[in-house]
Image (cartoon, rainbow, N blue to C red):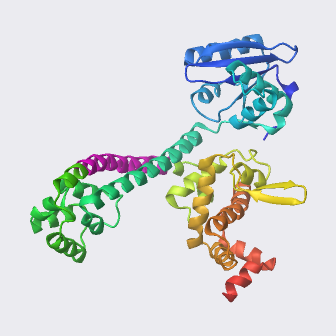
Amino acid sequence: MKAYNVNDFAALVGIDWADKKHDICEHPNDTEKYHYSIIKSKPEALHEWAMSLKQRYPNQIIAVVCELKKGPLIYALSKYDHLVLFTINPSTVAKYRKAFTPSGAKDDPSDALLQVEILTLHMGKLNVIEPESAAMRALSQLVEYRRNLVQDSVDLSNKITAALKNYYPQALEWFKEKDTLIFCDFILKWPSLVHAQRAKKQTLLNFFNSHNSHYAQVNDARIMSIKNAMPLTEDTGVIEPNQLLVEVLIAQFKVLLKGIESLDKVIKKAYKAQNDKVIFDSFPGAGPQLAPRLLVALGSNRDRYDDASELQKYAGIAPVMERSGKKMWTHWRYSCPTFLRQTFVEWAGLSIRYSFWAKAYYEQQISKGKPHNSIIRSLAFKWIRIVFRCWKTHTPYDESKYLEALKRRGSPLLKFAINS
């Protein structure tokens, strides 16, 4: 990643953003003065302001710092070549403000000034927003949106399960997987046990077959259970409100599942077009959901990270070590892109099923009494080094080569795997 210093820029600009307007502090490099202004958040106003900077500082670049990494403001400013966008953590500004404003007073223009001061003093420690290609940025948003929708579906599923347990628990036994259209359609068609027991056997069979459930043994067991089931309660004061709630939730759930399916198709097509696809397909356990997420986690700019440790820290996987006097302790890294960390942790957990050394490492740490979550984070830390190396050298991962490397180094991990 290119390193900048203050003298590279004609001016330093801090933006304290808001929904309706943005407070701006502009500091030209050839003067000690600071200019304050307010612009509306509308695209036209942002464009007019950005072009005015270009006219006032022709053939020069301007540094802009903001408490954002993405969003409408960043999307609007990223298209201007004369602006270099720096991002700063909101908590950093808050702590800086607190250090010099003991009263705790907060003001938007002064916050924009604080951002300029931080940029002036610590430019080398701030991240520069370097947009990827449009295709990569689209894929990045798609995989994150999908993950959010999956979480929404889990939340809805839990609500549906809780409501069904109040009056219709048998439906949960008939369908082990709730995130399926067959489950949704069954509940919509027969929203209570009374409705299901009124249905004829052939009607039920036709329903199961129309939803590609062709196992006769499974269908017969369901039908028998339906006919022999005993109601949990016959109290209409319980049944009717819960039935109405389930019908509303199921309708939402079905739309959500179809939306996730549509996103999967778009993600698959976008991922297939990426040149690095072969690298990320090679990682054990990545699969169709996590391989695209790993790809956007690294991106296509090989100069973005100098070494694996930068990615480990940025992703929040590397622990933070603190010292005070004779004491030393480590803790979870608090400030990081949550989705990025989530990607590496989720994949590390899945890799145990598909990677020999990952499984051996997990079992080795379990034998030492380490907790599951700590082991998975530690495993993610190791995987990032491997992923970074493969990405940097354009080389797909080969488990056999990695095991050979462990053998040459006399890794105790392989000895544990052999003896266990």
Nearer to us in this view, 252 or 296: 252
In the displayed structure, 108 sits above or below 89; it is: above
Question: Quick check: 273 left or right of 369?
Answer: left
Q: Residue at image x 14%, y 59%?
A: 195
Q: Is residue 108 left or right of residue 272?
A: right
Which residue is at 28% across, 55% downward? 184
Principal secondary structure, stretch drawn in magenta: helix
Q: Residue furthest right?
A: 325
- 227, 262: nearer the viewer: 227
Seen in the picture, residue 390 relative to 173 is either above or below; the reply is above
**Boundaries of the magenta span:** 244-270
Q: Which residue does the image show at 80% across and 59% down from the upper left?
A: 329
Counting from the top left corner in percent of width and height, residue 342 is at 59, 54
For the N terminus, which image quadrant?
Answer: top right
Which quadrant of the view contains residue 112?
top right
Quarter of the figure that contains the C terminus: bottom right
Number of numbered tags placed on the structure image = 0
